Every structure is written in structure tokens, then in C-alpha cells.
Amino acid sequence: MHEWCRANSVAIPVINEHWLGHCDFGVCAYYRNGTIDIWPNACAAIGTAGRCWSYPGYSVDRTPFGVLAHELGHHVDKQHGAKGGTLSHLWRPTDPEALTGYCPNSNEWFAELFRLFVTNPDLLRMLRPKVWPLFSTSWVSVERRAWYEVLAAAPRQLAVAHKRIARAA
């Protein structure tokens, strides 16, 4: 996250890690006023089998890595937008389909796509070709590997990503 912020001249948000207890809001992290509060132990573990689908760089990533990238998306939306995240509201009509089940509004839609832009930009390019130009012309990626290299250690997610890309084409 720090590398991405430096590469894009974005102010690095304050990060408060809470290793004990839980968030009163029932989430594992939230963004507010330039600060990300995260409870890493409440985030999903890396999963490649069974019902565990969360994996860094996959379209579903509730690991601490993915959650921080998602919350960074809220930070960037606030930094570059105005009045509650203009980017998210302006960009969503371009491709309104939710990337994951966690997109109840335009702000979360943006944060989920932004998360993938940070963690696996090539997969975002393949899955969301309509919004890809908005992200790629606004910021530079620091992740340079091909999407399948990012997911090489997660065969289940790799196989599903192949299918999703075929449907998106």
C-alpha cells in the first residue's frame, strides 16, 4: 500500500491495527477521515479449498492484504473525489455490475474494483474492460505480474478466474 501511494503521489492513510478485540461495527476494517482501522484477526484467512475463496489478488479477497487495499480505495475516492466520493458515483455507470457480493452502493463498488486494481491489475483489466481505462489512466500499478502469476499458488481461484475471463470477453 505504501509503495502504491508513493508511486501515485497519494497521501498514505494512517493505519491503526487492532490485534485484540473486535470492531463495534461488525466488520474487520473501516476507513474514516484519512485513517484505516483494521482488525487483522477478524479478516479472512487465505483459502484455496472448501468454502474458503479468499486469496490475495483474486476477485474475492477478504484477507488483511485485500481489506487494506479495499480501504485504500475509499481513501483514494475521498482524496480524488469531492462530496462523498465523486469518482465512485461518476464511474459506476460505466460498468455497474458488482465485482463481488460486497457492493451495496457506489462507494463499495469503487473500493472493490480499486482493491483488484492494486492487488491484481491485470485481472481487473480482463474482468472489467470498460472500467479498466478509468483506473489505468488515473493511476499507475505497482503490481506488474500477469493475473495468472498472481494466482499461481491458488489453483481453484486460477481455474475460476479463467472461466470468468472467458465470460467477460
Image: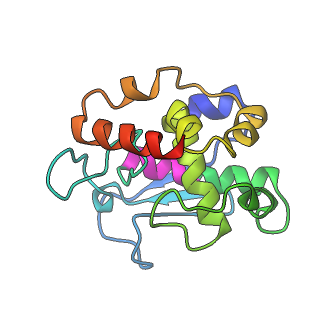
- Residue in the image at 82% along x and 56% along y: 81
Colour basis:
rainbow
Image quadrant in which the C terminus is located: top right
User: Quick check: is 40 in the magenta stretch?
Assistant: no
Determine whether, in the image, residue 89 is placed left or right of residue 51: right
Residue nearest the viewer, comparing 113 with 132: 132
Determine whether, in the image, residue 139 is placed left or right of residue 110: right
Residue nearest the viewer, comparing 140 with 91: 91
- Residue in the image at 49% along x and 37% along y: 119
Q: Residue furthest left?
A: 50
Which x, y percent locates residue 34? 67, 56
Which x, y percent locates residue 37? 49, 60
Determine whether, in the image, residue 165 is placed left or right of residue 9: left
Kindly tell me whether residue 1 is visible in this rendering. Answer: no
Look at the picture and state if 112 lies above or below 10: below
Residue nearest the viewer, comparing 15 with 26: 26
- Residue in the image at 31% along x and 50% along y: 54
Q: Main secondary structure of the magenta part?
A: helix
Look at the picture and state if 27 lies above or below 138: below
Which x, y percent locates residue 26? 39, 77
Which x, y percent locates residue 125? 59, 35
Q: Say which quarter of the image contains residue 109.
A: bottom right
Write the start and end of the magenta stretch as one range: 64-71
Q: Say which quarter of the image contains residue 161.
A: top left
User: Quick check: is 66 in the magenta stretch?
Assistant: yes
Q: Say which quarter of the image contains residue 88.
A: bottom right
Kindly tell me whether residue 5 is visible in this rendering. Answer: yes
Look at the picture and state if 141 lies above or below 34: above
- Residue in the image at 75% along x and 61% along y: 93
